Amino acid sequence: MPKKRPTPVEPDEQDIRPSKSQLKREMHELQQLGETLIAMSPAERARFPLSDDLLRAIDETARIRSHEGRRRHMQYVGKLMRKEDLSAIQAQFDAIEQEREQRDHAFHRLEKWRDRLIDEGDSGIERFMADYPDADRQTLRQLVRNARRERDQGKPPASARKLFKHLRDSAAL
């Protein structure tokens, strides 16, 4: 009796179905996403469109102490993540990242203002007041004067930190 050979799989049929390795990679990515959500505070997590089942599973994670129990629970969280709207969750992550980048950019801009004010003195204060007219000019001058004195004497930059805090408050960040 001749051996029966398996029927060859058409290339189109093979491309449609993902490999087992690819499925495992996707599941690990979903578990990682779940761990990221677990690490967030409840206030941050509230911004995401998550189902009640997933929220309960995330809350339950805090009670699990054993390593193996946590590992199994993370697999369960990954399974629940499959049912979530991943594009909406990713869009929220992107929005958070964009807010973080804008905040970082604003802080860098204020750091440059601080350094410029310390270097230039009154002319720098006038330029800052043109951009931020609600700032307190007298406090600003005093902080700049103290920060310059500290820099010239080689002391720790306590007034420069106070100046930065005042700039941040003036810019409403």
Image: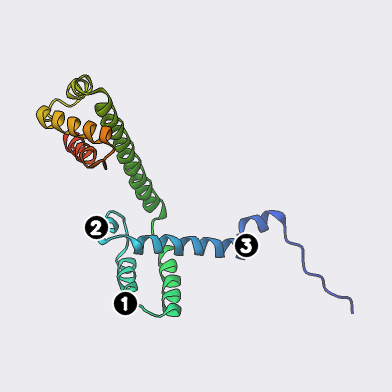
Relative height, residue 18 to residue 96 (above, below): below
Q: Nearer the viewer, residue 68 or 156?
A: 156
Q: Secondary structure at mark 2?
A: helix
Mark 2 residue type: Ala
Q: Secondary structure at mark 3?
A: loop
The relative height of residue 156 versus residue 131 in the rendered view (above or below) is: below
> In the visual, does 136 lie left or right of 92?
left
Q: Which mark is residue 43?
A: 2
Circle nearer the N terminus (1, 3)? 3
The type of residue carrying mark 3 is Ser
Q: Residues within 10 Å of mark 2 (few under 14, many from 20)?
A: few
Spot occupied by residue 116 in the image (x, y as percentages of width and height): 28, 27
- Figure quadrant of the N terminus: bottom right
Q: CA distance from mark 3 to mark 2?
A: 38 Å
Work out which quarter of the rendered image holds the C terminus and state it: top left
Residue 122 rendering spot, x and y as whole percentages:
19, 21
What residue sits right under mark 1 in the picture? 63
Q: Position of residue 154 (x, y in %)?
A: 29, 37
Camera-side residue of 96 and 139: 139
**Within the image, what quadrant is residue 140 found in?**
top left
Disc 1 to disc 3, how far (Cα)?
Answer: 35 Å
Name the residue beneath numbered marker 3.
19
